[in-house]
Amino acid sequence: MTVAPALPDTATQDAGAPAPYETAAADDGRVPDAGWAERVRALARQRDAVILAHNYQLPAVQDVADHVGDSLALSRIAATASQSTIVFCGVHFMAETAKILSPDRTVLIPDARAGCSLADSLTAEQLRAWKAEHPGAVVVSYVNTTAAVKAETDICCTSSNAVEVVASMPADRTVLFGPDQFLGAHVRRVLRRDNVLVWGGECHVHAGINGDQLAATAAAHPDAELYVHPECGCATSALYLAGAGAVPADRVRILSTGDMVQAASRTRSRQVLVATEVGMIHQLRRAAPGVDFLPVNDRASCRYMKMITPRALERSLVELRDEVTVDPDTAARARRAVQRMIEVGTPGGAE
Ligand code: SF4
């Protein structure tokens, strides 16, 4: 397994926020005033904008959005939206993916500083150098990557179809898999392929959901189901632990965020433990108000996601900022990698 350069501190969200992104202060526009939602909806109409919110956004942002979901589902909605402007409330690589799939629309992110430690753990320059070390290898990248990395990629994958995507490559061909080391380790284990070389990246938020914590939480709530999201950087570590038997497999359900919402609305369990970013709890409680949803790690909060404050969203619509651009050549190459992913198998959702 290839090991990448040192990663940011992975212990907790608070300790792990890497530079260079700034952090919104706790009271910096996060609490909307009484007229905020109405103003935002009116502005969206005036701007011919559709508001998309990722599942990990602050509850107020989720509640005002036209659509809430995972990044790939939102990008697909963006590609077919009738509006000329897309306001993507998520992190930067997600807005880039929306731009790649909707090149003719204006794509805004309310705060361009909202990055992603997993996406940042593999740069295009690092990937080019890695490719140069392994001429002839095929590059498979998780969708949590920048447009520049996708442009250097042969085929993208989600964690739903990562095994399928790698299995579609000739068995004797070296595969460079990045950036998530947990997902890569899972692929290697399932396919028993030693020629899958894995970059050592991870999500700094969800690396904090460790095996001991997962097992201890499950043991403390013996009747609870455990929902593990397979696509997020957070969840790929949990996926690895579940696959390795660190938690009882019969109570573990590996689910995309969309499937989590559906499962929540049908569950007969009174309590569900959720191994993913804490913002997901809001959607689950909306789907099943009578069920007790508990985060496996209540500190697993992505500060980048939370940089999209209600104030930032309103400012984005007033000032039409921050626009997300991807140069046409990069976008075309990145689009090919994303489209190949869709052709190989069902990609499911993304983070
Ligand atoms: S929670 Fe998601 S968006 Fe935030 S750092 Fe982790 S992988 Fe990136």
Image (spheres, rainbow, N blue to C red):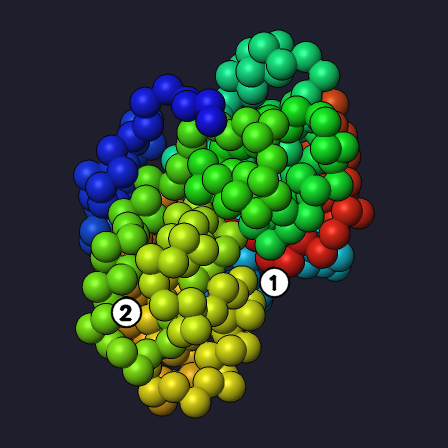
The disc placed on residue 218 is 2
Q: CA distance from mark 1 to mark 2?
A: 46 Å
Q: Residue furthest right?
A: 343
Q: Mark 1 or 2, which is nearer the eye? A: 2
129 in relation to 315, above or below: above
Q: Quadrant of residue 74?
A: bottom right
Q: Quadrant of residue 191?
A: top right
**Tag 1 near tag 2, CB within 8 Å:** no
Residue 81 at x, y percent in the picture:
72, 58
Q: Which residue is mark 1?
A: 45
Left or right side of 30 for 179 = right
Q: Which residue does the image show at 41% across and 22% down from the upper left? A: 4
Q: Which residue does the image show at 20% across and 73% down from the upper left? A: 220
137 in relation to 35, above or below: above
Secondary element under disc 2, as helix, strand or loop, is helix
Left or right side of 329 for 28 = left
Amino acid at dot 2: Ala
Residue 234 at x, y percent in the picture:
39, 50
Amino acid at dot 1: Arg
Secondary element under disc 1, as helix, strand or loop, is helix
Q: Which residue does the image show at 37% across and 20% down from the upper left? A: 5
The disc placed on residue 126 is none
Q: Which residue does the image show at 58% across and 10% down from the upper left? A: 133
Q: How busy is the neighbourhood of tag 2: few (under 14 within 10 Å), some, or many (20 plus)?
A: many
Residue 66 at x, y percent in the picture:
57, 66
Label 1 near ligand 1 (CB < 8 Å): no
14 or 269, nearer to the observer: 269
Q: How busy is the neighbourhood of tag 1: few (under 14 within 10 Å), some, or many (20 plus)?
A: few
Label whose residue precedes the other's in the sequence (1 or 2): 1
Residue 36 at x, y percent in the picture:
38, 65
208 in relation to 349, above or below: above
Whether residue 325 is visible, yes or no, is: no
